[in-house]
Structure formats: structure tokens, C-alpha cells
Image (cartoon, grey):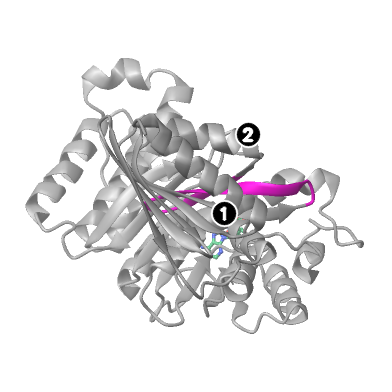
Amino acid sequence: MNAPDRIEELLSATKDAFASGALVQLKLGGYHGDEPELKAVLVKKITTKAGEKYSFTWRYKTRDTIKNYSQSEALALLREGLKDAFRSAQLATTDFDMLFERNGEKMRLKRTDVEGREVPSTDHNRAKNRPLTETDKPWLKALGLAGKNGAIRHDAQDKFRQINKMVEIFAPLIQVIKAERPLIVDMGAGKGYLDFALYDYLATVAERPVRIVGVEMREQLVADGNATAKASGFAGLSFQSGTIMEFDATGADAVIALHACDTATDDAIFRGISAGAALIAVAPCCHKQIRRQMEAGQADARLEPLLRHGIFVERQAEMVTDTLRALLLELNGYKTKVFEFVSDAHTPKNNLIVAEKDGRAGRDREAVLKQITDIKTLFGIEQHYLEGLLGL
Ligand SMILES: C[S@@+](CC[C@H](N)C(=O)[O-])C[C@H]1O[C@@H](n2cnc3c(N)ncnc32)[C@H](O)[C@@H]1O
């Protein structure tokens, strides 16, 4: 058998297992393509309203992206991937495993029989692969996303997609936290969209015990949130009224803040650092504090053209503020990443700073401090609000 047929042999076995219901999973690994942080692709069978589909989970370092395909689309994608970007694949069925390996043009396929493996339930897989499949829920109705009949309202489809996306991003970040029942604190929780969605997914779908506390200064939102959590039977989800700085976050494993206004994001980061949280994730809102200082005209003269136009000052202020936040997190032992977490079609405020506690981060304190000082000097910034909170 010549080399490319090994791929067809694997695909044919996958197709047969899909048809007979014996497919447990196909996992593509050894990725060496262009997508940063892609680790693997997992393929399962799921049953949707539109029929049986191949569900692909793209597993990135800190998040999963899930999409469903018809058989012809799925096989074409797999064929393409196995020829080029992926060097290995493992097919698991109820009767046998197949291991595919490729080294340049050379390919190997090894089959091993297995016994006693159960037929996977595609409904179960569906629930795991798509964060929020059930929509007839009290919290979705209370937040106005689902109508009385339990279906997502036409005008709330976009918001529901965004919420699912957030669960896809946040759930894997929470899942790697070692605590048995992590405490997640959401600062500036608002109506608690993220908290309800994340709690629902983690506690009822992923079966990971968690506690989530939403901190919010608007008392009515807190009362509404607690009533809805009770009506939903979400015993580990609660809302507390007060400001971020008033809240004692001791014991928090994760501190999150989505679009907390201006320096409220810094309050949240500070609370997270002080609590020694394993994860701090913030999606900043406006960046007025730094913008005002940049506009005061103390920046390096060479930056004048870059700061001449209001719209660019705003963008620079955003980048400078969040870069300094990322550096201050690093200085406090956090490995940080910044990426777009929802499409900018939904909101221009779509940067997410994700910081995970890592003993190796910020060890060269002097070097990080120098970077902070240099950026501040360049842009004429006297002090970042977070520096003040951290006593720098
Ligand atoms: C733009 S909303 C975002 C709500 C929610 N995080 C979301 O993404 O849907 C910001 C919320 O943070 C709350 N907030 C702002 N500053 C706060 C502070 N210092 N302490 C507590 N809540 C605050 C506001 O009342 C508001 O509900």
C-alpha cells in the first residue's frame, strides 16, 4: 500500500465507525501549522436538530473552539490536515484503536483491538461539546434571552452566541485550576450573564463543582441575580453588593472582570493579585486614566504625530494602559496573554488580558520595572492607577 492510502484507510475506518455508532473519538496531534497555540483537534459524533454531524473541537492552549460539519466537509478537512499540518492521529472506536503517524512522506498506521469499551452517547457528547445547548432555563428567561417557550429570542441570538463564546474561553481556564471547588469572583458583574452561563456549564454540564460570586455595586442587580440563582437551583452562585475595593477576595482562585469601567478593572486586578488568585482575567473597558495623562503633553516629542489625532490617542491609551497592566501582573508573578475574545463586530472593547500565576514570571524584577518606567517616560505618564494600588 503506498503512503497516501494510509490517510484514506484511517478516514474510511473513521467513517465506518461514525456510521455504526462505534466512534469514540479521533484526535489529531503533532500540529506544526500556522495557528499559534493550537494543540490538537478532537473529532466526535454528535446529534443535532439538523441530523448527525462531525463535531470538531480545536484545542488551543487556553481555550477550545467547536464547530460541527457534514461528513463530506469533515473528511475533506481531515484529509487536508493529515497531509500537512498534523503529524499524528489516534482513532478510538468501541472495537479497535488506530494510530497514524507521518514523518515527511512516510506514514504508518497501526491497529490494535480493544475490548469492553462502551458505545458513546452522542447526546452526552453534544452537551459537552456545545457549552449551552439547553435553553429552557429560568436564568435565560430572567435575563431576557429566552422567551416563555424556552427558545432563545430572535433579537437575543447574538448575545447568546457571545455568552457561549465566553464559556468556551473561560471554562478551560477554570478547569486547569487545581482547587477542588474553585472560588471565582466576578468583579462588576452587572446582570451576571457570564456568571450564570459559566456556573450552568461548569456545575451542570462539565460537572465541576465551583463557587461563583458576582460583585456589583448596583443593589437591584444583586437582588435580581440572587433571586434568579435561587430559582435556578444554583446553590454555588451568589451576588454581593458593594464596590470591588470593599470586597474581601481572600481565598479567590480566579478573579474576573468584564468591562468594569476604567480603573475598576485595576481594582479587580489588584484584588486578584492580593488574593494570590491562580487566574486573573479582565476585559478592560475605557482607558481614561492613562489617556488624560497622555493628553497632558508630557510625551516624548517624537510621538507627537502618533498622538495628534483623537482616535489614535484613544487607541494608544488602550494599548499603553493594558501593556502596563500586563507588565504589572508579570511583576507580581503572573504569566500574561492578551487576545481578542469576541469579534469586534459585537464590541470594540474586545481585548482580554489573561494572567495565570506562574513562579517563573517576573523573576527578573529589575528588567520588568525598567520596561514599565521606559513606557511611562515615553508617553509622559506619571503613574498608572494600578501602580498606586500596588504601592509602587
Ligand atoms: C459595563 S457593565 C459590565 C457588566 C458585566 N461584567 C458584563 O460584562 O455584562 C460594568 C458593571 O460594573 C459595575 N461596576 C463598575 N465599577 C464598579 C465598582 N468599582 N465596584 C463594583 N461594581 C462596579 C457597574 O455597576 C456595572 O454594572
Q: Is mark 1 within 8 Å of ligand 1?
A: no
- Look at the image and tell me whether residue 379 can be seen: yes
Q: Could you tell me which residue is drawn at 41 percent across and 27 percent down?
A: 313
Query: Which is more toward the observer, 330 or 64?
Result: 64
Residue 384 against residue 236 in the figure, above or below = above
Mark 2 → mark 1, Cα distance in angstroms: 15 Å
For the residue marked with disc 2, what is the amino acid?
Answer: Ser
Q: Could you tell me which residue is drawn at 36 percent across and 36 percent down?
A: 319
Query: Which is more toward the observer, 225 or 241?
Result: 225
Horizontal side of 211 relative to 357 (left or right) equals right
Outermost residue toward the front?
Answer: 1
Q: Position of residue 13 (x, y in %)?
A: 52, 47
Assign a secondary structure to mark 1. Answer: strand
Name the residue beneath numbered marker 1. Answer: 44
- Look at the image and tell me whether residue 260 can be seen: no
Q: Is residue 215 magenta-colored?
A: no
Residue 351 against residue 24 in the figure, above or below = above
Q: Position of residue 304 (x, y in %)?
A: 30, 18
Please state the quadrant of the image where ligand 1 appears: bottom right
Q: Is residue 65 magenta-colored?
A: yes
Q: Where is residue 281 in the image (x, y as percent from the top left)?
A: 42, 58
Q: What stretch is highlighted in magenta?
A: 49-67
Q: Could you tell me which residue is drawn at 31 percent across and 72 percent down?
A: 274
Q: Quadrant of the C terminus?
A: bottom left
Residue 378 against residue 210 in the figure, above or below = above
Q: Position of residue 209 (x, y in %)?
A: 53, 80
Q: Which of marks 2 and 1 is nearer the N terminus?
A: 1
Name the residue beneath numbered marker 2. Answer: 72
Q: In which quarter of the image is the N terminus?
A: top left
For the residue marked with disc 1, what is the amino acid?
Answer: Lys
